[in-house]
Amino acid sequence: MKNAKTLGIQFVIKSSKVNKRGLSPVVARVTVNGKRIEISANKVISRSE
């Protein structure tokens, strides 16, 4: 029997963490076999882009 392994990567704007200039950080959500972590992409973006 084979064991299925999964990998998923999503880039997400954290709109709940807006800074004083109105910019939100971008994070990468990495999911491996159902376990998720978030890693900062060291980028910020405005909601209007």
Image (spheres, grey):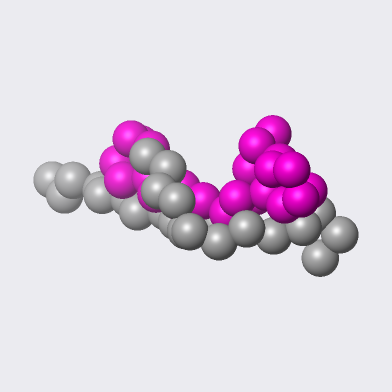
Q: Observer-nearest residue: 27 or 35?
A: 27
Above or below 19: residue 48: below
Where is the C terminus found, in terms of image quarters? bottom right
Q: Observer-nearest residue: 39 or 44?
A: 44
Horizontal arrangement in the rendering, residue 21 relative to residue 29 (left or right): right
Q: Is residue 48 magenta?
A: no
The residue depicted at 68 percent of the width and 49 percent of the height is 24
Q: Bounds of the magenta span?
A: 13-36
Measured from the top left, where is residue 23 in percent x and y?
A: 72, 52
Where is the N terminus found, in terms of image quarters? top left
> Which quadrant of the structure image shows residue 20?
top right
Q: Residue furthest bottom?
A: 49
Horizontal arrangement in the rendering, residue 33 relative to residue 36 (left or right): left
Q: Residue furthest left?
A: 1
Q: Residue furthest right?
A: 48
The residue depicted at 32 percent of the width and 50 percent of the height is 6
The residue depicted at 16 percent of the width and 49 percent of the height is 2
The residue depicted at 51 percent of the width and 51 percent of the height is 27
Measured from the top left, where is residue 11 in percent x and y?
A: 55, 56
Above or below 36: residue 41: below
The answer, for residue 48, to whether it is visible in the render is: yes
Measured from the top left, where is residue 25 in percent x and y?
A: 60, 50
The answer, for residue 10, to whether it is visible in the render is: no
Q: What is the tally of numbered marks visible in this picture?
A: 0
Q: Is residue 34 magenta?
A: yes
